[in-house]
């Protein structure tokens, strides 16, 4: 038998259902969150939503050099990676709030 009997099991199920609702709400809020990553001292900036979708890319015309396309490519990649890292950290922070710091793989 479950500790606490039927009432204990019922309470546990209510808690699990509330946690599931809270997680769904957090995932929805995260999807709407926007972060910005930049590189080259702000010469390249990327805005990304919580679904890891790039919603804007800004490139300062001073960094556009036809003789050094590789540098521009590197700056774009660095800005995207920074934005993705911010989204990942935000996801972990939100999940941690809901789970009390317990890491549950695959939640975000």
Image (tube, rainbow, N blue to C red):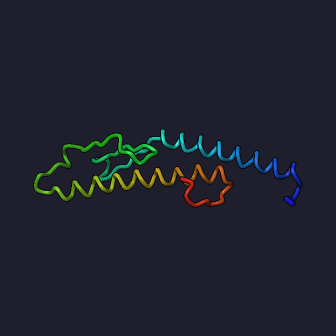
Residue at 35 percent of width and 40 percent of height: 55
Q: Quadrant of the N terminus?
A: bottom right
The image shows residue 10 at horizontal and vertical percentages of 81, 47
Q: Is residue 98 left or right of residue 68?
A: right
Total numbered labels placed on residues in the image: 0
Quarter of the figure with residue 34: top left
Q: Residue furthest left?
A: 67
Residue at 58 percent of width and 43 percent of height: 26
The residue nearer to you, when weighing 98 against 85, is: 98
Residue at 64 percent of width and 50 percent of height: 97
The image shows residue 39 at horizontal and vertical percentages of 32, 52
Q: Is residue 76 left or right of residue 1?
A: left
Q: Is residue 46 left or right of residue 49?
A: left
Q: Is residue 29 above or below residue 73?
A: above
Q: Is residue 9 left or right of residue 66?
A: right
The image shows residue 61 at horizontal and vertical percentages of 19, 43
The image shows residue 40 at horizontal and vertical percentages of 29, 53
Q: Residue furthest front?
A: 1
Q: Residue furthest right?
A: 5
Q: Is residue 58 above or below residue 102?
A: above
Residue at 81 percent of width and 47 percent of height: 11
């Amino acid at each position: 038998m479950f500790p606490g009997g039927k009432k204990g099991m019922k309470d546990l199920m209510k808690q699990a259902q509330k946690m599931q609702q809270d997680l769904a709400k957090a995932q929805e809020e995260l999807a709407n969150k926007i972060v910005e990553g930049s590189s080259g001292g702000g010469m390249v900036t990327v805005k990304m939503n919580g679904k890891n979708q790039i919603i804007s890319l800004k490139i300062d015309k001073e960094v556009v050099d036809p003789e050094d396309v590789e540098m521009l490519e590197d700056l774009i990649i660095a800005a995207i990676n920074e934005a993705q890292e911010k989204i990942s950290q935000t996801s972990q922070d939100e999940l941690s709030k809901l789970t009390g710091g317990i890491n549950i793989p695959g939640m975000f």
